[in-house]
Amino acid sequence: MPTGKYTYDYPRPAVTVDIVIVTRESKRRVLLVRRKHEPFRGMWATPGGFIEMNESLDDAARRELFEETGVRLKKLVQLQTFGDPHRDPRGRNIAVAYLAIVNAGELTPRAGDDAAEVAWFSLARPPKLAFDHAEILAAARAYLRRKKEKGKRKK
């Protein structure tokens, strides 16, 4: 086996991270990036991208978030894994989605790397999204609903 080269009997999917950043306010907003490159060039998406070979998932999520939005966050929660075989037209891809709840006024997002633009949108009514990111936002909304209901039960 050549050094630094991985060979397997079975094909392996790529692994990516997607980061859902939502605000604490009652009418929650989500931070999205407009894609600079294909696939889905010009469409809105959650910040994210491919993990590097020697990088943890958490580190990849923080790196991609910073590269695309200029935002640095320490606390990210793994939300869910998305693995539909057709989620990415470039090939087989498994995405690990993360969630962070923030005070929007404390962030100064700016577009960088693969992002042409960055903006806040209503979490309840986002624009049409690239890939399966509408499904990822639906999972985030469900998580936040469960968290809110759990908080009400504790009172």
Image (spheres, rainbow, N blue to C red):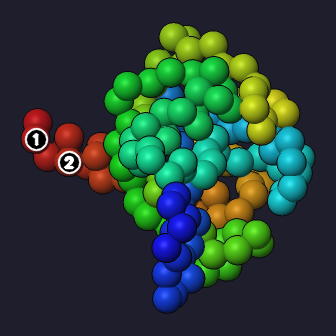
Contact (CB < 8 A) between labels 1 and 2? Answer: yes
Coordinates of residue 52 in the picture (x, y in percent) = 54, 48
* Closer to the camera in the image, 112 or 29: 112
- Image label count: 2
Residue beneath the point at 10% across and 41% down? 154
| Residue 74 as seen in the image, left or right of residue 44 | left
Name the amino acid type tagged 2.
Lys
With respect to residue 149, does 4 lie above or below?
below
Name the amino acid type tagged 1.
Lys
Q: Would you name the residue on which mark 1 appears?
A: 154
Q: Which label was assigned to residue 150?
A: 2
With respect to residue 115, does 80 lie above or below?
below
Coordinates of residue 87 in the picture (x, y in percent) = 66, 72
| Residue 122 as seen in the image, left or right of residue 6 | right
Binning the other alpha carbons within 10 Å of mark 1 as few (below 14), some (14 to 19) or many (20 upward) gives few
Residue beneath the point at 63% across and 13% down? 108
Residue at the bottom extreme of this rendering:
9
Q: Secondary structure at mark 1?
A: helix
**Res 95 visible:** no
Dividing the picture into quadrants, the one containing residue 119 is top right
Residue beneath the point at 76% across and 69% down? 90
